[in-house]
Image: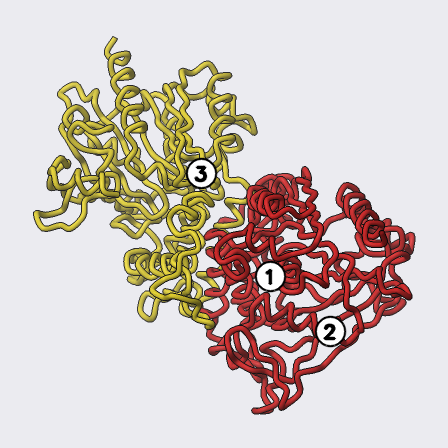
Chain colours: A red, B yellow
Amino acid sequence: MSEYIEHDKNGISAGIVEKKFYTFARDPDLLTLECGSKIGPVTLAYETFGKLAPNKDNVILILHALSGDSHAAGYYHQNDPKPGWWDTMVGPGKGIDTQKYFVICSNILGSCMGSTGPSSINSVTGRSYGLDFPLVTIGDMVVVQKALMDHLGIQKILSVVGGSIGGMQVLEWCARYPESVVSAIPLATTMKHSALAIAFNEVARQAIMADPNWNKGNYYSGNKPDLGLALARMIGHITYLSDESMRLKFGRRLQDRADFSFNFDADFQVESYLRYQGSKFVERFDANSFLYITKAADYFDLEKQHGEGSAVRAFQKMRSAFLVVSFTSDWLYPTYQSKAMVQAIKKSGLDVSFCEIEAQWGHDAFLLPSERLSNLMKGFLERVRVECRK
Amino acid sequence: MSEYIEHDKNGISAGIVEKKFYTFARDPDLLTLECGSKIGPVTLAYETFGKLAPNKDNVILILHALSGDSHAAGYYHQNDPKPGWWDTMVGPGKGIDTQKYFVICSNILGSCMGSTGPSSINSVTGRSYGLDFPLVTIGDMVVVQKALMDHLGIQKILSVVGGSIGGMQVLEWCARYPESVVSAIPLATTMKHSALAIAFNEVARQAIMADPNWNKGNYYSGNKPDLGLALARMIGHITYLSDESMRLKFGRRLQDRADFSFNFDADFQVESYLRYQGSKFVERFDANSFLYITKAADYFDLEKQHGEGSAVRAFQKMRSAFLVVSFTSDWLYPTYQSKAMVQAIKKSGLDVSFCEIEAQWGHDAFLLPSERLSNLMKGFLERVRVECRK
């Protein structure tokens, strides 16, 4: 990550940014969700970077993964120790150049990062929703994001960009609002979860729900299910890395000891790393949000929901140009899944570019600094903007 | 599994077998373990199939994986609903032919299947050991198995055979008692756990230890950590399958419903499957044994423990002929790890045959009926027996 730190030192960032909030769907105009339930009011957290062009043709919408937030880049204040989660990609002169584009990063419905989710106060009861929060889908998340775009007066988005669950939102945007999306960049994502991906999510959810502090989702006034959430995060972390990346990063190196402990302490560095990741995560994330967002990802099925079982039919409804990117060592959403997507896009007659990037860091690769990825995105965005202007 | 059921119907099994026990290391002749602790008495459960040849040249020792036991084949009684765990491989005319060979299957130290382990009564306190049970290694397991062989009057073993953690015991046998092992068949195994394998084990252990019923290992007189152990098993099960096998076995099929539940019930078949596997496992396995055996597997490092850091040097101490088998879709112990083993064996000058079997069932493939594997083992065993007689 040294490249990343250098970047910061150079101060080439989107600068000081502010988290903003848009609230809508106030009673009686509640939002009807895919499951049939109604909720409101709905708040969505978002941040913007760069300037909107007078003709509004330079909008890029960034959508984040499971535990992300609206803070894609920049700093909240001068002494903020670290920048947003995609600061290596979003900023002046970077892959998504904030000197050229007006970048919006939107949080998601169901999250705990400023938007309405299970930890939010239910206006009917005056207490946190907990499991009274209805199950939301990737479609519901996108409907809420569309309301935000309408609120901001943006009818056309030059590019919708996102990795992992953010990539599912990208596909959903293209399917639901084809006239609004000029181009799309789904990264390290899939048209639908494999049984393996569902299995990992399910075990992670079971870990949370097995924690007695979870208390059927009602823990906001007491002890939180930290052990369960930490476990869920550890399971997730294994899937974000890869056999190769773990071998390079940890191998069989021991943690602060010359030999085995011969007890159940963390002997190996990889054990300490996972325990650390688990314990850090509980400080910033809500266990119920983890349940809701993973379930939304498992439910996502582009073919079923938009193509009557056919991926080609789903893409035939769309109008965007695509840049699809996968990573060699991503075994959560392996390249063959991106290739299937690319095949379907091609068959639908849409413009598609595809790149499999050689990367050892597994699924997480899309979040790490990559000149290759930055250049790919920069080139693609420039091209679609030119074509858009014709 | 229809092939497997046919087998049973035909009655081609090792017949009625009996679990036996050998107890040694009685006070004051306690067993000193690798960690330095002493324990005793030590009981080892084992079963035998077939007949010992008068010159004792037909002994095959089978060593089992994490949750296995001594019951490799046959039935305990006439109405026993299912045979031993490797009945498709071990029996009259099968890959390991009980009409030719005297087959011994030994349980392991630390297990809960009849041998001394954390759930056993500590003769000093009169209560179950719990975490007072010392951490045992693959080496300790093999030392105890050697004591059993001595007790049975067997000085030379025609072949030591085992998959997964059983394969680690195979390698350890060859390293520790080179003069006793004529040949060895390590299946779907590794010379040392990768960081990925350690990571999965660690998360599974954390799941057990996060269960409040675990109570630092002291649960034998109260509620057991069933939720934690079920989670650990679910995590394990994902690693035993593969992306491909899960896609074929489950895909995105829903469980007993036409559409999503829009709650946290099991929607997908793969979720129900994992929950079922978890709940079944807690009926037959001890959570502390899970902790001890996985830790022993993580500690196992043939190069470090027997070759001063060199796999070649470790094999140079051995005298066995090897048949190494890996499976294409095994991502817990991928083929590249078996290939590294084969390379080291070749360099050491020992006789080695290697086969990577095309199999979609992941790590579990070594347990499933496979004509290919049966024929390979049959041929190898016949060859080494002939060579042994020369």
Examine the rendering and report whether any part of residue B156 can be seen.
no
Q: Tell me the residue that label 2 is attached to.
A: A148
Q: Amino acid at mark 3?
A: Asp
Tell me residue A214's x, y (percent).
50, 75
Q: Residue at x 46, y 14 (%)?
A: B349
- Taking depth in this image into account, of B62 and A328 the one nearest to the observer is A328
Tell me which label, 1 or 2, sits earlier in the chain.
Answer: 2
Q: Is residue B285 left or right of residue B98?
A: right
Examine the rendering and report whether any part of residue A310 can be seen.
yes
- Taking depth in this image into account, of A196 and B298 the one nearest to the observer is A196
Q: Amino acid at mark 1?
A: Gly
Report how many numbered discs are placed on residues in the image.
Answer: 3
- SS at badge 1: helix
Residue B330, label in figure: 3
- SS at badge 3: loop
Q: Tell me the residue that label 1 is attached to.
A: A278
Q: Are marks 1 and 2 on the same chain?
A: yes
Q: Badge 3 sits on which subunit? A: B
**Mark 3 and mark 2: span between their CA atoms?**
46 Å
Q: Are marks 3 and 2 on the same chain?
A: no
Q: Residue at x 36, y 26 (%)?
A: B177
Picture quadrant where residue A86 is located: bottom right
- SS at badge 2: helix
Tell me residue B250's x, y (percent).
39, 52
Q: Residue at x 54, y 79 (%)?
A: A133
Mark toward the viewer: 3 or 2: 2
Mark toward the viewer: 1 or 2: 2
